[in-house]
Image: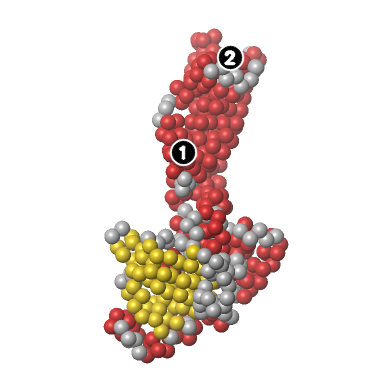
């Protein structure tokens, strides 16, 4: 496959992707393409395969059939080629997963130094600037366990951004946070979206989906049931599954 | 203490424990290096390496150390003519170190492997997600955290290693237990005293080591 970087070509393409956990069919013939600079929010009931879909894009989850293409290239199966691909795709986890034995600044500079071979001093400068941007520069020398959940998640976003990724994946980034900390993380994500970062966001935050997404994708039972612009989706869901889901979460 | 007031006896006592300390020190370093490599093999995605690591642990952990040290002497040296030094004492010392290291490495490996299991899977996932290779993930993220989690058990392995060095006496090295036997043979009237002095020396060295590792374990623990 020839790598091409025309801006029309989508950055992420999933083609007939299937995934099983034993007998459980978690992704069923999923087709999805995400354009450059597009923000796609994936919603759906739990167990619908949203997280698996998100994790398959940087191959933290392998797939059983189908094809995933990133920036014109099929995902490598393993080894250095896969590591290189992952370095171009930022990932933010539900449980932050900051390196527990490293300071916040070391968390942010580790990738640039070890993967991109940047000079430590340069990486440090950029790392501090990124921490400044997500509002936790004053926490740079603390360890993850000393920070609140919201601060940890913002540090995790800075760690992903430090790799200067072509796209960012968010796997339920606010689900493990106390309610008062959700806003500070969503603010950072919203500003990223405004700056044109390509994002795939699995979330239950309907407010974020409404104001930051270009497209909402609704999943149920491993299938991609419906996709539309957020205004359209929330006002006029077409499928019964989506209507049912929205009625359950929006009435409270 | 009439036995130890004889300078010749006292020198023997000191030289016996010097062998113990040297064997412990050298074997500890070698066993640690080997143990880390074996642990890395046992969690690697390459089946041959996993198989090799498992075979090593199963063979050396389940063979009595006496047999391993005997094999080093009668097998490696006497039969296969592997000589590690021209000096007879140093040769026995190094043969002993080989046996102690391969044996202790199996225990270091298993301690580290249980430590790896205490590191949440998300740590390795996050490392892979920023583009670190398998080896980098292990070296930079997983093993440092696993090592800190098993400092106390590694202390126990070190203490066991120190006491196990006395087994090298069976192939002729004049380490502490051999010296003790000799002193007892020559001074049949002071058996209890001699025994208590040798046992007490081990205790005096090893009890602080135990507390040191306990303190280190607390100090270096990874906060989650």
Q: Which residue is mark 2?
A: B3
Residue drawn at x 56%, y 42% as measured from the top left: B212
Q: Position of residue A224 (x, y in %)?
A: 36, 75
Which of the 4 quarters of the picture holds residue B110?
Answer: top left
Give whichever of B17, A195 is nearer the camera. A195
Q: Is residue B203 above or below residue A94?
A: above
Residue drawn at x 34%, y 73% as measured from the top left: A223
Residue drawn at x 47%, y 57% as measured from the top left: A77
Q: Taking the image as drawn, is residue A153 in sight? A: no
Q: Is residue A172 above or below residue A110?
A: below
Give the mark toward the camera: 1 or 2.
Answer: 1
Residue drawn at x 63%, y 60% as measured from the top left: A116
Quadrant containing the N terminus of chain B is: top right
Q: Residues under labels 1 and 2: Cα distance?
A: 48 Å
Q: Position of residue A152 (x, y in %)?
A: 53, 68
Give whichever of B184, A147 is nearer the camera. A147
**Image disc number at residue B53:** 1
Label 1 chain ID? B
Please rate how many residues cluster around mark 2, counting C-alpha atoms within 10 Å: few if below 14, some from 14 to 19, many from 20: some
Q: Position of residue B166 (x, y in %)?
A: 52, 23
């Amino acid at each position: 496959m020839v790598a091409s970087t025309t801006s029309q070509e989508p950055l992420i393409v999933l083609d007939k992707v299937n995934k099983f956990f034993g007998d459980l069919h978690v992704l069923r013939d999923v087709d999805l393409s995400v354009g450059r600079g597009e923000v796609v929010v994936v919603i759906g009931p739990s167990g619908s395969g949203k997280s698996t879909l998100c994790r398959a894009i940087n191959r933290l989850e392998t797939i059983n059939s189908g094809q995933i293409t990133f920036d014109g290239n099929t995902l490598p199966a393993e080894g250095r080629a896969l590591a290189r691909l992952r370095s171009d795709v930022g990932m933010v986890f539900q449980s932050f997963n900051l390196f527990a034995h490293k300071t916040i600044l070391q968390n942010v500079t580790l990738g640039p130094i070890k993967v991109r071979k940047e000079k430590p001093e340069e990486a440090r400068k950029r790392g501090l600037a990124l921490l400044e941007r997500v509002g936790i520069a004053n926490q740079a020398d603390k360890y993850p366990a000393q920070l609140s959940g919201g601060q940890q998640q913002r540090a995790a976003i800075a760690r992903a951004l430090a790799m200067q990724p072509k796209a960012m994946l968010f796997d339920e980034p606010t689900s493990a946070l106390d309610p008062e900390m959700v806003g500070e993380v969503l603010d950072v994500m919203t500003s990223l979206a405004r700056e044109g970062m390509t994002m795939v966001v699995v979330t239950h935050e309907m407010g974020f989906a409404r104001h930051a997404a270009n497209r909402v994708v609704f999943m149920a039972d491993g299938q991609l049931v419906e996709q539309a612009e957020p205004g359209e989706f929330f006002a006029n869901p077409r499928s019964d599954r989506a209507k049912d889901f929205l009625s359950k979460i929006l009435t409270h | 203490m009439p036995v130890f007031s004889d300078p010749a006896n006292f020198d023997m006592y000191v030289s016996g424990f010097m062998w113990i300390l040297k064997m412990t020190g050298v074997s500890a370093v070698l066993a640690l290096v080997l143990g880390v490599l074996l642990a890395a093999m046992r969690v690697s995605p390459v089946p041959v390496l996993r198989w090799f690591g498992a075979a090593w642990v199963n063979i050396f952990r389940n063979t009595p150390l006496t047999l391993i040290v005997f094999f080093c002497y009668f097998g490696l040296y006497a039969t296969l003519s592997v000589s590690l030094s021209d000096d007879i004492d140093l040769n026995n010392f190094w043969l002993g170190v080989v046996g102690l290291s391969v044996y202790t490495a199996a225990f270091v490996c298993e301690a580290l492997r249980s430590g790896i299991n205490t590191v949440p899977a998300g740590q390795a996932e996050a490392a892979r997600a920023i583009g670190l290779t398998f080896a980098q993930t292990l070296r930079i993220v997983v093993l440092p955290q696993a090592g800190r989690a098993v400092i106390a058990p590694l202390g126990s392995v070190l203490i066991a290693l120190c006491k196990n060095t006395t087994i090298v006496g069976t192939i002729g090295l004049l380490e502490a237990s051999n010296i003790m036997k000799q002193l007892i043979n020559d001074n049949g009237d002071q058996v209890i005293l001699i025994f208590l002095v040798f046992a007490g020396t081990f205790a005096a060295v090893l009890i602080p080591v135990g507390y040191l590792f306990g303190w280190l374990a607390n100090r270096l623990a990874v906060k989650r």
